[in-house]
Image (spheres, rainbow, N blue to C red):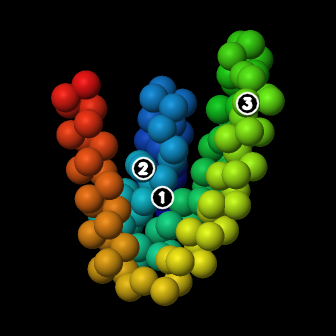
């Protein structure tokens, strides 16, 4: 339980600090530090991200750094994409998902390093 709470603190901190989706932090930590299978890590991460996003949204809203209209323009289609992604995920094996996620993270890292 303490390990999961620590994962939550790390994910929340990075999410608010860098504006990254908590899944970029939570999913790898759940897999590597808590022994979750990829599908379980993803589902658990998404549930946790809802709470993380709420906290961050309140914080940035209080500071006046929130554009609700633009958030809806991004968020509503993203919600539809999340449903499609969850459906697709069920057709893929854990190993394929893990490798695809690792490739995504590697591409992001390279893009950030060369920018």
Residue under the image location 44 percent in, 41 percent down: 10
Q: Position of residue 53 (x, y in %)?
A: 66, 41
Q: Element at badge 3?
A: helix
**Residue 82 lies in quadrant:** bottom right
Which residue in the protein does label 2 denote? 24
C-alpha separation, residue under disc 1 versus residue under disc 3:
32 Å
Which residue in the protein does label 1 denote? 4
Q: Position of residue 65 (x, y in %)?
A: 69, 16
Q: Position of residue 27 (x, y in %)?
A: 43, 59
Q: Nearer the viewer, mark 1 or mark 2?
A: 2
In the drawing, what numbered circle is on residue 70?
3
Residue under the image location 30 percent in, 51 percent down: 105
Quarter of the picture containing the C terminus is: top left
Sequence-wise first label, 1 or 2:
1
In the drawing, what numbered circle is on residue 34?
none
Of 37 and 109, the residue lying toward us: 109
Q: Element at badge 1?
A: helix
């Amino acid at each position: 339980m303490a390990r999961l709470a620590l994962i939550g603190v790390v994910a929340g901190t990075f999410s608010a600090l860098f504006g990254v989706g908590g899944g970029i932090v939570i999913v790898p930590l759940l897999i590597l530090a808590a022994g979750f299978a990829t599908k379980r890590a993803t589902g658990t991460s998404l549930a946790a991200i809802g709470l993380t996003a709420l906290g961050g949204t309140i914080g940035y809203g209080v500071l006046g750094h929130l554009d609700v209209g633009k958030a809806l323009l991004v968020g509503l289609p993203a919600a539809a994409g999340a449903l499609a992604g969850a459906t697709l995920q069920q057709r893929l094996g854990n190993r394929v998902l893990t490798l695809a996620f690792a490739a995504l993270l590697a591409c992001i890292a390279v893009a950030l390093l060369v920018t």
